[in-house]
Amino acid sequence: MGKGSGCVPSKKKHPTSAEDAAGTSSTTAPIAADEETHATPTVTESSENAQSVAATLKVFIVFYSMYGHVEKLAKRMKKGVEGVEGVEAVLYRVPETLPDEVLEHMKAPPKAPEVPEIKAEELAVADAILFGFPTRYGCMAAQMKAFFDSTGQLWKEQTLVGKPAGFFVSTGTQGGGQETTA
């Protein structure tokens, strides 16, 4: 075993081409000139004031909820996301993998019809994605795992590269596995 230096950032900062030209350096991480940038497109409305309005960013909130607890969290997330000007949140449910008879036996309530099921290909349209799912013995629910497994083609084509993503989890008890699910 080594001396345990771990993940220590390099002390040798190489100036970017923009810093070379300007002769300055910045404390924030600059975007190199050869990197692709994603600017928010603008849309012009024709009105008396001719205002310029930024296009709406779409954040997909994709969740699985058998009993409705994670769905409530997803709706709260939606409310928070839409509190940011210029951002729209869209709720999606992952497909259920259990048969209706099993869900009925488990006394699971019916799914809300206003929340559509998502297909993996639809993730490409989102500007950012939040995933929500319950914890089952320290792991994500099988339905969410099945959905993630269906995104293989997107990962192969690197369709989701550069899209910010996050997740939220829930358990029935405090310390019930959220930390290992994460």
Image: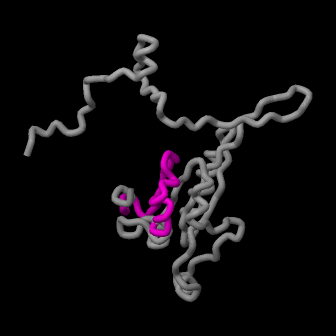
Does residue 15 sit above or below 76 in this rendering?
A: above
Asked if the stretch drawn in magenta spans residue 10, the answer is no
Q: Nearer the viewer, residue 98 or 151?
A: 151
Q: Quadrant of residue 15?
A: top left
Q: Residue furthest top?
A: 23
Is residue 143 rendered to the left or right of residue 44? left
Q: Position of residue 24 (x, y in %)?
A: 42, 12
Residue drawn at x 81%, y 29% is 51
* Figure label count: 0
Name, please, the residue furthest toward the left.
Answer: 1
> Can residue 69 be seen at all in this image of the molecule?
no
Q: Nearer the viewer, residue 41 or 139?
A: 41
Q: Residue at x 71, y 66 (%)?
A: 114
Quadrant for residue 100, please give it: bottom right
Q: Which segment did they paint magenta?
A: 149-177
Instruction: Say which residue appears at 55% left-offset and 85% top-offset.
Output: 99
Q: Is residue 78 visible?
A: yes
Question: Is 155 or 78 nearer to us in this picture?
Answer: 155
> Is residue 152 part of the magenta span, yes or no?
yes
> Horizontal and vertical percent for residue 44?
80, 34
Q: What x and y, as percent, mark residue 23? A: 41, 11
Q: Quick check: 2 left or right of 90? A: left
When the figure is inspected, residue 157 is found, relative to residue 31, above or below; the finding is below
Considering every residue shown, the one lying at the far bottom of the view is 101
In the image, residue 87 above or below residue 51:
below
Q: Residue at x 59, y 67 (%)?
A: 119
Q: Split into 4 quadrants, where in the image is the C terminus? A: bottom left
The spot of residue 172 in percent (x, y) is: 44, 65
Colour treatment of the image: one colour
Q: In the picture shown, does residue 40 fall above or below 147?
A: above
